[in-house]
Amino acid sequence: MKQIVISTAYITLGQVLKEVGIIDTGGMAKWYLAEHTVYVNGEDENRRGKKLVAGDVLTTADGTEYEIVAN
């Protein structure tokens, strides 16, 4: 499982997708989430503005898992 370190209270799902290189721009998040299934803590999620906090686990369409950790 890969880790994404945040120094704020939360990070949005769209920001995570951009940070890990799945999408190039924030505007692509809506399209990506409509075309691909991603899970947050095991539940299907399609809102690009979903706030992820430390302890949350994101699973992308290819099965890669990312854990959100606080700095």
Image (tube, grey):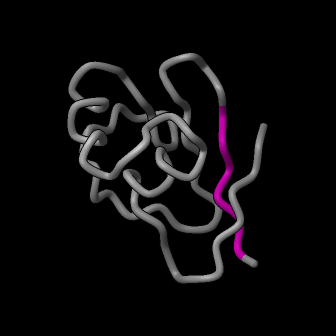
Up/down of 50 relative to 8, above or below: above
Give the farthest residue toward the bottom.
8
Q: Main secondary structure of the magenta part?
A: strand
Nearest the camera: 7 or 40?
A: 7
Compare residues 17 and 52 and report the one nearer the observer.
17
In-image side of 24 versus 56 (left or right): left
Q: Quadrant of the N terminus?
A: top right
Q: Residue 6: x percent and y percent? A: 64, 72
Q: Residue at x 49, y 73 (%)?
A: 10
Give the quadrant of residue 32: top left
Q: Is residue 7 magenta?
A: no
Q: Is residue 6 left or right of residue 40?
A: right
Which of the pair 4/45 is nearer the observer? 4
Residue 7 drawn above or below residue 3 = below
Image side of residue 55 versus residue 59, left or right: right
* Residue at the image position 52 percent from the left and 28 percent from the top: 60
Residue 2 drawn at (x, y percent): 77, 42
Please state, as top left, top right, bottom left or bottom right, where the C terminus lies in the image: bottom right
Image-based side of 47 in relation to 24, left or right: left
- Establish if 20 lies above or below 49: above
User: Picture quarter containing residue 29?
Assistant: top left
Look at 21% across and 27% down and name the residue there. 34
Q: Which residues are magenta?
A: 65-70
- x%, y% of residue 41? 51, 43
Please identify the quarter of the rendering in which residue 68 is found. bottom right
